[in-house]
Amino acid sequence: MRLVIAVTLQWHYCMRLVIAVTLQWHYCMKLVIAVTLQWHYCMRLVIAVTLQWHYCMRSVIAVTLQWHYCMRLVIAVTLQWHYCMRSASQQYQGMPNTACISYLSRQHR
């Protein structure tokens, strides 16, 4: 009878060990899944921030190019006015501004 009790207790402790190991495995898998999901969301955040930076840089480049073309236009109009004033001062001694304004208005029609 003592042998039956000893074997039953041994079986009981063995089952408790199996359950403990199974639970430990279960919690380990939950931890692995949690870390994997955390990594997944971290990567999504990195991608989102990278895309945001990309679009920000595209916007900065677009504004810089717009400024560049605006400055080119200002320089072109300034040079055209300068050459017009030089030409008009030679042709129209009295009112070069009026001649330039009429000349430029004809140019941009």
Image: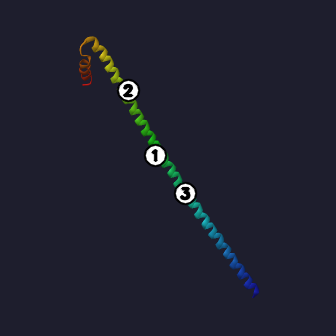
Check residue 52 in the rendering and tell me which mark sits there, or answer none: 1
Where does residue 86 sit, x and y in percent of width and height? 31, 14
Q: Is residue 101 above or below residue 17?
A: above
Within the image, what quadrant is residue 103 found in?
Answer: top left
x, y percent for residue 53: 47, 43
Quadrant in the rendering for residue 32: bottom right
Q: Secondary structure at mark 2?
A: helix
Q: Nearer the viewer, residue 70 or 96?
A: 96
Mark with earlier residue (2, 3): 3
Q: Which residue is mark 2?
A: 72
How many angstroms separate mark 1 from mark 3 (CA)?
Answer: 21 Å
Mark with earlier residue (1, 2)? 1
Residue at 62% x, 70% y: name it.
Answer: 23
Report the quarter where the N terminus lies.
bottom right
Mark 1 to mark 2: distance in Å?
Answer: 30 Å
Q: Which residue is painted at 69% across and 75% down in the image? A: 14
Q: Is residue 5 above or below residue 93?
A: below
The answer to which of marks 1 and 3 sits earlier in the sequence is 3
Coordinates of residue 46 in the picture (x, y in percent): 51, 49
Give the residue at mark 3. 38
Q: Is residue 14 left or right of residue 44?
A: right
* Front of the two marks 2 and 3: 2
| Position of residue 16 in the picture relative to residue 41 (left or right) | right
How many badges with numbers are in the image? 3
